[in-house]
Every structure is written in C-alpha cells, then in structure tokens.
Image (cartoon, grey):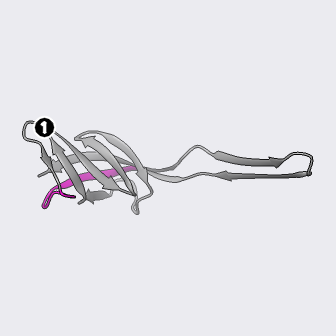
Amino acid sequence: MFAVIKTGGKQYSVAAGDVITVMALDGAPGDAVTFDEVLMLGGDDPKVGAPTIAGAKVSGEIAEQTRSAKSIAFKKRRRQNSKRKRGHRQDLTLVRITAIES
C-alpha cells in the first residue's frame, strides 16, 4: 500500500518504511509526525481524494534535521566591474514513514 501526501507545498508518494526528505519540520530526531493531507491511497482498492481523503493519515518519525548542498547564484556584468555571489542552503528534514492509516 502506498499514499500520496502533501507537505511543504510539494507532493510525495510514500510507503511504509520509506525515508523521505521534506522541507523543514519542527521537532527533534525521534519525534513523531502526522501528515493529514492525504491526496491518494493506492493498493488493491485505490482511493482518490477530492482534494483530500477524510480520516486518512500517514504517520512517521523524524530521522534527522539536515541542510541541502549549497547552491550558488553568481551574477557578473561584463566590462562593468560588477559581480555578485550569493550562497544558499535549504533546511531539510528526513522523515521515516511508519504507518499508513485509511
């Protein structure tokens, strides 16, 4: 059985035991999290929400709080002696999916 959940403005297809990387969630490693916005449940009897499935939940636990690789935005204007370099690292959370409840 799998589910499609929505969190942080993105959609993720998950199954029990998966480890997914989502935008930063509050909590420490080992804390339980619940995703209530379940868009679809798949398997033998698939269900599609309009837009979500009432009563369906996906449970997980926070495995790690981490950051993404650095992305660099470098802008140079030729012959103008003008350049700008900016770096960014996004805060991320690794979540281990423990159960899908319909």
Instruction: Identify the residue at the far top of this view.
Output: 44
Q: Position of residue 55 (x, y in %)?
A: 12, 60
Q: Position of residue 32 (x, y in %)?
A: 28, 57
Amino acid type at circle 1 is Gly
Residue 42 or 80: which is nearer the viewer?
A: 80
Q: Number of labelled discs? A: 1
The answer to if 60 sits in the magenta stretch is: yes
Q: Is residue 27 above or below residue 16?
A: below
**For this view, does 91 lie left or right of residue 20?**
right
Residue 96 or 39: which is nearer the viewer?
A: 39
Residue segment shown in magenta: 50-63
Residue shown at the point (17%, 54%) measured from the top left: 49
Q: Quadrant of the N terminus?
A: top left
| Residue picked out by circle 1 | 43
Q: Residues within 10 Å of mark 1 (few under 14, many from 20)?
A: few
The image quadrant of residue 37 is bottom left
Residue 30 or 87: which is nearer the viewer?
A: 87
Q: Is residue 35 above or below residue 44?
A: below
